[in-house]
Image (cartoon, coloured by chain):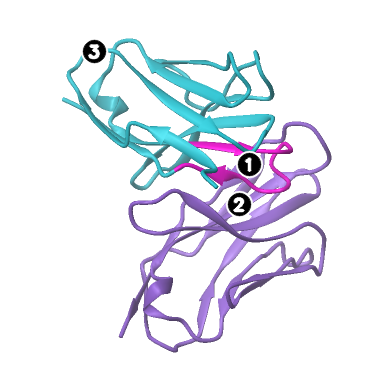
Chain colours: A cyan, B purple
Amino acid sequence: NAGVTQTPKFRVLKTGQSMTLLCAQDMNHEYMYWYRQDPGMGLRLIHYSVGEGTTAKGEVPDGYNVSRLKKQNFLLGLESAAPSQTSVYFCASSSTGGRSGYTFGSGTRLTVV
Amino acid sequence: GNSVTQMEGPVTLSEEAFLTINCTYTATGYPSLFWYVQYPGEGLQLLLKATKADDKGSNKGFEATYRKETTSFHLEKGSVQVSDSAVYFCALTLQPGGYQKVTFGTGTKLQVIP
């Protein structure tokens, strides 16, 4: 009963490095989301997907790219990390557009130095 | 646009005290309302929800009633436990179908002391 699994859980990057965060869900959900959580800012939507092969921009998409090649996976990429991207990243999924509620992963804590 | 306003935290209560966390909203349509809980070091978990006026969502002793006339969805629990210490997020999404953005409040931290 895994739900939403995020890897890695922690990562430290140097400015300018790249990395990919992986999100996998086993609930056959159509919709998937990437959020970042920062103190005092709440949750902010980075990108989302309404189905396999689709992606769309959220509130704060700059500096990030995403892909949804398989229904169960949603990847978040940072091409050239910046200190402003230090945050906790959460992936979520839902069977409908949000009316049934989201299932969240446990998060990835990323520090860019 | 849509927005969710939660009371400022942190809220500190003694064990077995009564809890109220206020949440009010503005929405351009007819929203579904949610409470999520985030325990330390974890992701958010759906706690309860309500989809129409006067509905009461409930789970694990927590309750919230969808009040359309006051645009509120306050979270209550009659007797809190130390294990309820967490951050609580109020959220809304509009109906009907297809993708609808979920708007989250900024969260209210609850600390329960023995």
In depth, the one of A60 and A31 nearer the eye is A31
Q: Secondary structure at mark 2?
A: strand
| Image-based side of A48 in relation to B31, left or right | left
Is B75 located above or below residue B32 in the figure?
below
Q: Count residues near mark 3 (Cα–Cα under 10 Å), then give few for <14, some for 14-19, many for 20+.
A: few
Q: Find out whether the residues at labels 2 and 1 contact each other: C-beta distance under 8 Å.
A: yes
The region drawn magenta spans A91-105
Indicate whether residue B77 is drawn in magenta. Answer: no
Residue B80 point in image, percent of width and height? 46, 81
Tell me the residue that label 3 is attached to: A17
Q: Quadrant of residue B82?
A: bottom left
Instruction: Name the subunit of mark 3.
Output: A
Which residue is nearer to you in this view: B44 or B102?
Answer: B44
Q: Residue at x 47, y 51 (%)?
A: B106
Residue at (44% x, 89% y) in the render? B16
Real-space CA distance between mark 3 and mark 2, rounded to the nearest whole angstrom: 34 Å
Residue pointed to by mark 1:
B102
Task: Give coordinates of residue A80: x percent, y percent.
Answer: 29, 11
Q: The residue tagged with tag 3: helix, strand or loop?
A: loop
Q: Residues within 10 Å of mark 2 (few under 14, many from 20)?
A: many
Q: Amino acid at mark 3?
A: Gln
Task: Report the Cα–Cα distance between label 2 and label 1.
Answer: 7 Å
| Quadrant in which the C terminus of chain A is drawn | top left
Q: Secondary structure of the magenta portion, mostly?
A: loop
Instruction: Give the CA distance from mark 3 to mark 1.
Output: 31 Å
